[in-house]
Amino acid sequence: MDAIRSRIDPASPEFRSNSEHHRNLAQQLRERLAVARRGGPEAAVATQRKRGKMLPRERIDKLIDPGSPFLELSPLAAWGLHDDEVPSAGIVTGVGRISGQECVVVANDSTVKGGTYFPETIRKHLRAQEVGLENRLPCIYLVDSGGVFLPLQSEV
C-alpha cells in the first residue's frame, strides 16, 4: 500500500498561526481543568480537612480499583456561571472500575457552596445517570450535600 503524503507545510505562516492558536487553546483548557479540580475556596477545603473528610476526587480514588482509570464527565460544567463559584457544577461525575465492574460514580463536592444543588448540578447529575442507563452501568453515589441552593430553588 502506498503511503499517503501530506500536503501540509509546517513552515507556512498559516500552519504556524493555526498551531499557535491551538496550543493556546490546549493550555487554556489545562488551566480551566486545574481550576475546576481544585473545587471550592481554600477555606471550605480547610473546613473539610479539619472535619477529617476527604474531597470528592479523593473519595473516588479510594473507591475505584487501584491503578484503574477514572473518566470524569463534564468537569467544566457551570464554567463562567455564578461568578465562577460553582466549579464542576459542585459535583464530580464519571466512569470508573470498582471490583472489576465499570460503574458511574457521582460525588457531591461539599467545598462548593456546601454541596448544594444548582440547576447545572441537577443537569450534570441526570446526565451521569443517563450515561449509566444507556451503557447498563451501575451508579454509585457518594453523597455529601446541603440540598438545594436556596436562592435558586425555584429553578431546580
Image (tube, grey):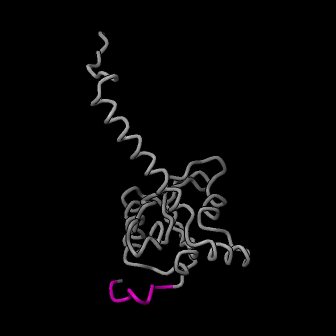
Quarter in which the N terminus is drawn: top left
x, y (%) of residue 66? 66, 50
Note whether 53 is above or below 28 in the view shown: below
**Would residue 24 be found to the left or right of residue 66 on screen?**
left
State the residue in front, 73 or 24: 24
Q: Quadrant of residue 114?
A: bottom right
Highlighted magenta segment, given as a residue range: 147-155
Residue at x-position 41% and y-position 44%: 24
Q: Is residue 4 above or below residue 66?
A: above
Q: Work out whether 126 lies above or below 28.
A: below
Magenta includes 58? no
Placement of 115 over or under 60, stated as above or below? below
* Total numbered labels placed on residues in the image: 0
Q: What residue appears at the point 59 percent right and 56 percent down from the top-left corner?
A: 98
- Residue 86 drawn at (x, y percent): 46, 72
Q: Principal SS element in the magenta part? A: helix
36 or 72, nearer to the observer: 36
Residue at image point 33% right, 89% down: 154
* x and y percentages locating residue 75 in the rendered image: 46, 60
**Image location (x, y in percent) of residue 102:** 52, 53
Q: Is residue 46 left or right of residue 83?
A: right
Query: Seen in the image, is 148 located left or right of residue 1?
Result: right
Q: Residue furthest top?
A: 2
